Amino acid sequence: QSALTQPASVSGSPGQSITISCTGTSGDVGGYHYVSWYQQHPGKAPQVMIYDVYYRPSGVSNRFSGSKSGNTASLTISGLQAEDEADYYCTSYTRSGATYVFGTGTKVTVL
Amino acid sequence: EEQLVQSGAEVRKPGESLKISCKGSGYSFTTYWIGWVRQMPGKGLEWMGIIYFADSNTKYSPSFQGQVTISADRSISTAYLQWSSLEASDTAIYFCAGARNGNFFWDVWGQGTTVTVSS
């Protein structure tokens, strides 16, 4: 069971849009609609930003959106703000062990 | 409001045993899955395993099978993560997370428990 692949870092200026990819296999991302995305600020617990590929929990800004194509899911942050600077992780339900697998994590920097 | 409250930081020597806890409050967690997540210093998140409060059905990620034990006491809405013989490489922050049965995302998180294993 290998971790899902994410870019190590993504950066953008305030107001810009950025997209983070999350690539897995047909046994996880490609096989299920159960991809979720988590934001983690330093020293804090993760917080869900997107679930089931593209649904937003109440209270999460509509600047965050999700999508999926084949074995790759994506998180887009539009209108980038300083408070968006954090680590982001995707996770997917996986056939292997009937449990979950995280992505490798992406550090988002707001320039 | 649902909350998961974890036990406090622990310092142990290699070879010692340890059991940390994650207690749910503000809601009946009987129909929740609880997952345990490891974050080693400066590294990413890793799923260790999940347990269903209602019947203690437990699933381990392959990397952690046989390395730890996950258990739960639904009468006190508390899940546990246990080691029988710690190693220095177990030094990490451990988070518990909750997902309602039928959901496949984790919307309630504990504050994390720091475990330090050092001689």
Image (cartoon, coloured by chain):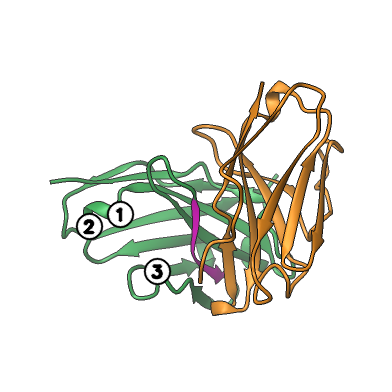
Chain colours: A orange, B green
Residue type beneath disc 3: Phe
Decide: marks 1, 2 in contact (CB < 8 A)? yes
Secondary structure at numbered mark 3: loop
Query: Magenta includes B50?
Result: yes
Q: Is residue A78 left or right of residue A88?
A: right
- The chain under label 3 reads B
Secondary structure at numbered mark 2: loop
Query: Magenta includes A8?
Result: no
Residue B28 visible in the shown view: no
Residue denoted by label 3: B64
Q: CA distance from mark 1 to mark 3?
A: 11 Å
Residue A34 visible in the shown view: yes
Query: Which quadrant of the figure has residue A14?
Result: top right
Q: Give, as a single range, the part of the protein colored magenta.
A: B45-52
Residue type beneath disc 1: Asp
- The chain under label 1 reads B
**Residues tagged by mark 1 and mark 2 found on one chain of the structure:** yes
Decide: marks 1, 3 in contact (CB < 8 A)? no
Q: CA distance from mark 1 to mark 2?
A: 5 Å
Residue denoted by label 1: B90
The N terminus of chain B, quarter of image:
top right
Q: CA distance from mark 2 to mark 3?
A: 13 Å
Which one is nearer the viewer's eye here, B108 or A11?
A: A11
Q: Dot 1 surroundings within 10 Å: few (below 14), some, or many (20 or more)?
A: some
Q: Which mark, by number, is residue B87?
A: 2
Q: Dot 3 surroundings within 10 Å: few (below 14), some, or many (20 or more)?
A: few
Secondary structure at numbered mark 1: helix
**Residue B53 percent location from the top left of the image:** 57, 69
